[in-house]
Amino acid sequence: MGFDPEELYEVDSDVPDLDGAVLLHFFDGFMDAGSTGRLVTDHLTNEVENRVIARFDVDRLIDYRSRRPPMTYAVDHWEEYEAPELAVRLLHDTDGVPFLLLSGPEPDHEWERFATAVKHLVERWGVRLTVGYHGIPMGAPHTRPLGVTAHATRESLIGGDHQPLPNRMQVPGSVSALLEYRLGEWGHDAMGFAAHVPHYLAQSAYPSAALLVLESVERATGLHLPDGELRVAAQVATAEIDRQVAESDEVADVVRALERQYDTFVEASGRDSLLAESQEHMPTAEELGSQFERFLAEQGGDSPER
């Protein structure tokens, strides 16, 4: 069988000139602490007028039995089927600049063919930069400035505002990571942002992390994206988190311990972020999150995602 990535998608017949546009992407299914990527994607599609200009063949890419699409049964018949959709949408920022958003379930099959298909679209539309985003759990308190890890196919894309992780690690692969890796090999600019979500909020929606990602995307791309609704949601969520912490002495103790550790390392380095620390002083996520993990175990809750 021939390897034809163009079989994986269909493109709308009415697509304007997109030369120089930015392509954002987020795929459901991989790690997304605080629902960071999902919140950003939903915010953009809800707040910005958009339309689908390309659809991928989910029958070939998705394993329905591992992620069964919801269906609605009403009295004596099947009323609705929520079919999965993996698509590229065309949006415009507040200045009218077009940009693209690729989102949907992470493909279960044909990762290499999918990455090549996205490459074809990048070249077909003249995309200048591809950007992914999601959230990762981190052993840091919500009461301190959130961090974000940036990575890219070229160091100059990251800029001086982001500190690199101080070590080398091997992690499970994802379509988003593979796409960035392959695009770099093919000579296209690509990058990604991972917001640092406190361990104890990893399983909950955390709009503050989504807002941080949105701001990072703006700085990297030059787009001007609406953030009002997300900013309000972040304020409401933070107030609710503070209320719940205040009502639990055990949780408050955990947060205070994380604050002390955070402040100690930041003060010792004279910098603004834990990621600015040297490797020998950098605490691991396991060290900072162990106290709360013990608390969750005592409560019979689920452990934070790793």
Image: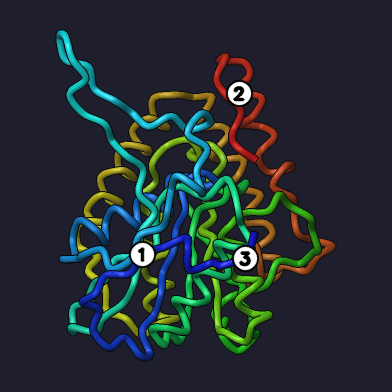
* Residue that appears at 56% across and 67% down: 4
In this view, the residue in front, 95 or 54, is 54
In this view, the residue in front, 166 or 86, is 86
Q: Quadrant of the C terminus?
A: top right
Residue at the extreme front of the image, as rendered: 1
**Sequence-first disc among 3 and 2:** 3
**Residue 82: percent from left, percent from top:** 28, 35
Residue contact between numbered discs 3 and 2, judged by CB atoms under 8 Å = no
Q: Quadrant of the N terminus?
A: bottom right
- SS category of the residue bearing label 1: strand
In the image: residue 57, left or right of residue 239: right
Relative to 206, say whether 213 is above or below. Answer: below
Q: Gap between marks 1 and 2, in whole Å? A: 49 Å
**Residue 298: percent from left, percent from top:** 62, 15
Q: What amino acid type is highlighted by mark number 3? A: Phe
In this view, the residue in front, 289 or 5, is 5
Which of the numbered marks, if any, corresponds to residue 23? none
Q: Gap between marks 3 and 2, in whole Å? A: 51 Å
- Badge 2 density bin: few <14, some 14–19, many ≥20, Cα 10 Å: some
Relative to 190, say whether 144 is above or below. Answer: above
Query: Which residue was labeled with disc 1?
Result: 10
Q: What amino acid type is highlighted by mark number 2? A: Phe
Relative to 237, say whether 65 is above or below. Answer: above
- Quarter residue 59 falls in: top left
- Colouring style: rainbow
- Quarter residue 263 falls in: bottom right
Which of the numbered marks, if any, corresponds to residue 295? 2
* Residue that appears at 34% across and 45% down: 238
